[in-house]
Each structure stands twice: as structure tokens, then as C-alpha cells.
Image (cartoon, rainbow, N blue to C red):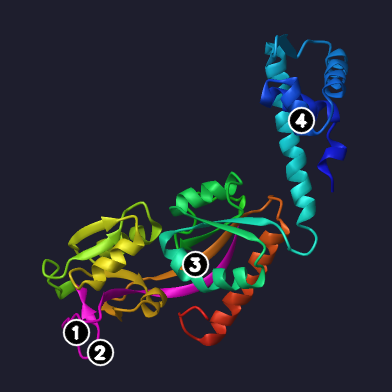
Amino acid sequence: MSRNTIFPRSLRYLLAVAKHSSFTRAAESMFVSQPALSQQIKQLEAQVGVQLLERSGRNVHLTDAGEIYVHHVERALAEINSAAQALDDLSDLTRGSLNLGLTPITDYLTVSLIRDFITKYPRISLNTIEMTQQQIEEAVLQDQVNLGVIFSDSFSLSTRSADLETYTLLTDSLVLATASSAHLITDPNGCLNLGELDLVRHPLALLNSQFEMRKQIDVYFSDHEITPNVTLESNSLGVIIEVVRSGELHTILPASIVASLRGLSPLAVNPPLPKHTATIIIRKSAYQSQACSAFLKLALLWSRALGDTGSGTPPN
């Protein structure tokens, strides 16, 4: 669809003059003659009944009325562009974009899903943004991202908003992650008893308290009257993983993430750590683009295949 055919020529000329502060440069940018452009502007000013441009020598400036008028014209053009984009991506997914909100945990969990989407739809522009769960929920509600993949559990969404629709992707257990070279004393079943663990000798590196998984871990420690020695807190999972690989610290992660990382080994603990769930959230009443629908459909197929594997490791 040609957007120029549905956006008045006189308004496009006005925006060009406002941008270049010159009739000559505006006409050149629009590939029209200067008299033709000037005539369109005069007709527009006559229609709206106010002077929009102040002409002083070679320079042209917006009047106060012109500033207000151009502001609304730009907003109208933005809406037309959005409408045209919505129609464009109805075709065959050869164009379009998708903004995806992820937590530091769910971006690791969904790597293979994202890879599958890029492979299947190489011309869709996928933008992933790492945020906390609460930030993702707000971004989805405000249409700043099309959908989010969050970490949820029994206390579910922070906002508990009726405007959010959820789709479960996978459920996994949390485990203690250690360097593969680390040697910790376990019970006959291969479990580490955290209640008896010398936490000064075995300090932890965890995501900071902004993140939902950390909140769940803190509840676990509180429920079992365990006082952990959290030596390192970070909002970067990559930093935590590298520190743990060095053998100095341990961390708590989903089993599927630990299984996918070289140099780390999972260790079950007693009492058992809780499970976690990766969940897609979208705003119920939001316009769902073809790119967004395609990602959701692929994600649910990916989730079904994951369930068929009978393990917590995402399918490749």
C-alpha cells in the first residue's frame, strides 16, 4: 500500500518545509518544483485559516500555530504508518518485527526456540530485551513489547492483571550448580544436605532480589530456616555462570540451563529446591501481528515437543 496516496500531499510538503526550514530544500527532497510546493502550502493555510509558516528571507520557520499543527500532523502520519505496517505483515511473513521481553533466566531457556524462529522466519526482525519480570509485565501491558517470557510459580504474575493471557512453555527443577571440578560431600543418594552445608566454605552467587527466581530461592531458604552465604549478587546471569565455572562459588539455576552449559554440573539438594515454570504472557486485547502469532504458535509446538522428550532440556 502506498502511504503517500492516503496522506494529503499538502501535509507532506508542510512536514518537509518544517524539517528543512527552506522551500527550496523541501521541494528538492520531495522531487517537486518550488512553486508547486509553495502553492500547496498556501492552499493548506487557507483551508486551516491560520498562518503556519513565517517567511523571512531564505529561511522559513513554523509559527506558534504551525508548531501545534505539525505536531498533530506527525502523530497522524505515525498512525497511518502503523496501520500500513499492520496490513503489510498480513501477507506471508516476509516482513515484520517482533519485540520479545525476556528475563536473564528465560533468555537462556528459550535459546533453541529463538533459533528455530529465526530459521523459520529469517526476514522477521526479532528484538529481544532483557528485563526483570515486573518490567516485562508492565512492558506487555503498555505495548512496549509484543509478548514476554517470564519465570513464574505458585505466586504467579506480580501484577496479577486480568489483562494478561498466559501460556506455559516448560516446567523445570532448580538445582545447585557447581563447577564440574568441584567435589562436595553428598549423601548416599547423591544429594547435598543444605541444612548441614558449611555455607562459609561454599558461598553462593545469585541473581539480585529484583528477579523472580531469586525471590523464590529466598522463600525456600526462609521456609527451611537456612541462612545462605550469598557472596555475589548480580543482574547478569553470564557473570554468575563464569564465576561459578571458576570453582570459587556455587549458584542455583534451572536444571535445563545447567545441563546446557559446559563446565557446570547439577547437584540435587535436600530439602529439594522448588520447580519453576517458563510462561509466555501477552496482553489480551492487544493487536496480534502475524509475526507475534507465528512466534506463539511455534512456541507452543516447541513446548509440546519438549514435553514429548520427557526431560527438562529444551529440544534442539
Q: Mark number for residue 62?
A: none
First in sequence, mark 1 or 4: give its number. Answer: 4
Q: Mark number for residue 278?
A: 3
Please identify the quarter of the rendering in which residue 10 is found: top right
Residue holding disc 2 = 189
Whether the residues at callouts 4 and 3 have beta carbons within 8 Å, the answer is no
- Amino acid under disc 2: Asn
Q: Give the vertical position of 101 relative to 197 (above or below).
A: above
Residue 268: x and y in percent read 29, 80
Is residue 153 something one can see in this rendering?
no
Residue holding disc 4 = 28
- Amino acid under disc 4: Glu
Whether the residues at callouts 1 and 2 have beta carbons within 8 Å, the answer is yes
Residue at the spot 72% in from the left edge and 26% down from the top edge: 25
First in sequence, mark 4 or 2: give its number. Answer: 4
Q: CA distance from mark 4 to mark 2?
A: 79 Å
Q: CA distance from mark 1 to mark 4?
A: 77 Å
- Amino acid under disc 1: Thr
Q: CA distance from mark 4 to mark 3?
A: 54 Å
Q: Give the vertical position of 67 relative to 97 (above or below).
A: above
Residue holding disc 1 = 186
Residue 141: x and y in percent read 58, 47
Q: Give the vertical position of 54 relative to 176 (above or below).
A: above
Instruction: Magenta stretch: give its range.
Output: 165-194
User: Is label 4 in a helix, a strand or a loop?
Assistant: helix
Q: Residues within 10 Å of mark 2 (few under 14, many from 20)?
A: few
Q: Residues within 10 Å of mark 3 (few under 14, many from 20)?
A: many
Q: Nearer the viewer, mark 4 or mark 2?
A: 4
Q: Residues within 10 Å of mark 4 (few under 14, many from 20)?
A: some
Residue 214: x and y in percent read 34, 59
User: Is label 1 in a helix, a strand or a loop?
Assistant: loop
First in sequence, mark 3 or 1: give its number. Answer: 1
